[in-house]
Amino acid sequence: MTSHSHGTAVPAHQARSVAEHRAAVTDLLARLAAESRAEVLPLSGALGRALVHGVLAPISLPPFANSQMDGYAVRSTDIPDGGSDVRITQPVPAGSSPRPLQPGTAAPIMTGAMIPAGADAVVPIEKAVPDHFRTEGSGGLVTLPATVPGTYVRTAGSDIAAGERALAAGTCLGPAQLGLLAALGVAEVEVYRAVSVLLVTTGDEVVEPGQPLPPGKIYDSNGTLLEAAMQQAGLNVRRTGISTDNPAELQALLRTRGGDVDLIVTTGGVSKGAYEVVRQAMVEQPVEFLHVAMQPGGPQGIGLFDGVPFLGFPGNPVSCLVSFEMFLRPALSALVGAPAPRLPLSARLAHRLVSPGQKHQVRRGRLEPGGTVQLQGGESSHLMHALAGSNVLVHVPAGVTELAAGDEVEVWML
């Protein structure tokens, strides 16, 4: 990877597309998909992780035919079209192994209980006369309507058969996936180790929240914003204090804190100003600083710092979050399956927007229940209040300069 000299701007016609930069980030992080990064965890510790290998069902679900309702297990051929009285036999509670059902009898059965051999249907209790279970137990009569084979019977393997693929390799394990594994009797899984990230905010102008705010200074929102986004995505984040605009100090900080992480991410110091500390600190490293045809988040840094993958995000808060969502999150999803990709939806604009035709614009918006999206704030990358009021990212592809109210756009749920 070549290194641009400090302060050299990338000509506009050389701006990298969003897709190209996402591919470059994915390539940079390809080592994260190595099986050497696998670990075995109990289900209780695997939430948000991704499977290294697919899982085949060790048993069928359900493992035996069972009742879908509280009612009576019957032989359908025992009951004529007009219904009939049937003698009640031994009840079948859930968890028991029932005796075979004798011809001409009906077994009271609970939801989830095993269907007795010989029975082929269940008549719900509310269709029986009387419509409640008799307290005197077996030996009495119950009037039941005619039924057909299979009624209210969950057949063995109707959910998944033993030997079928339950989950594919790379599946991100959420509550539903972990629940399936538990239902199959799987107690532990081989997953990719969580990605560890060193997160560094840069800038002499930045002050930690809670400290006095001198004139000309701003509070650091990038650190909290990105740390929260990364933690929510399942990354292990090591956050440093704010780095000054001294390149040597930044280099020392990265070497002291970043030698054993999977990735280094910085915010700020990647543009073409006179005091771009990240650019200066990376002069001797195989790091490229370039412009992506995206708004916000155009300036980007990518490469290696002392052999550790490095990404340099812009300093404006919305820009750094959009950079994470557009590049780092999708790359990790593609490589190791976690975090899960953002869900793309179609929505209709509540009002008109304009966009620079040569850039992919990412706006913030609020998706309303009716399927329309209200843009929050303008396109500027400092509008934190507008970001906090948003629940989607609104995508306007390169080549589109104007959209009218009612036009369809792609949105990503946040």
Image: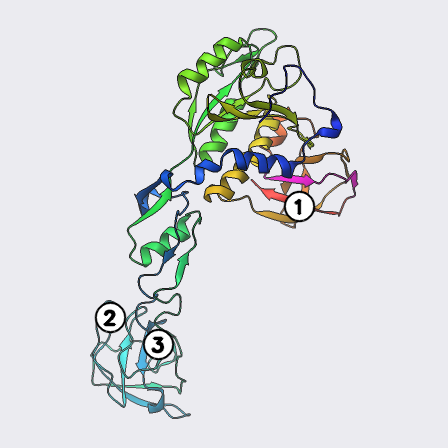
Quadrant housing the C terminus: top right
* Residue 15: x %, y % from top left: 70, 30
Q: Residue furthest front?
A: 2
According to the picture, the residue beneath numbered tag 2 turns out to be: 93
Residue 359 vs residue 141, the one in the foreground: 359
Residue 95, compared with residue 374, is above or below; it is below
Crowd rating for badge 1 (residues with CA inside 10 Å; few <14, some 14–19, many 20+): some
Crowd rating for badge 3 (residues with CA inside 10 Å; few <14, some 14–19, many 20+): some
According to the picture, the residue beneath numbered tag 3 turns out to be: 125
Q: Residue furthest top?
A: 215
According to the picture, the residue beneath numbered tag 1 turns out to be: 410
* Residue 277: x %, y % from top left: 57, 13
Question: Comparing marks 3 and 2, which lies closer to the viewer?
Answer: 2
Query: What count of labels does the image hold?
Result: 3
Amino acid type assigned to the residue bearing label 2 in the image: Pro
Amino acid type assigned to the residue bearing label 1 in the image: Glu
Locate residue 5 relative to residue 148 in the image: left or right. right
- Region in magenta: 390-404
Q: Is residue 222 visible?
A: yes
Residue 51 numbered tag = none
Residue drawn 36% across the image and 73% down it:
155
* Residue 72: x %, y % from top left: 31, 79
Amino acid type assigned to the residue bearing label 3 in the image: Ile
The residues bearing labels 3 and 1 have C-alpha atoms spaced at a distance of 49 Å
Residue 252, compared with residue 112, is above or below; it is above
Residue 198, compared with residue 367, is above or below; it is above
The residues bearing labels 3 and 2 have C-alpha atoms spaced at a distance of 14 Å
- Any magenta on residue 403? yes
Picture quadrant where residue 272 is located? top right
* Residue 329: x %, y % from top left: 52, 37
Pointer 3 with pointer 1, Cβ within 8 A: no
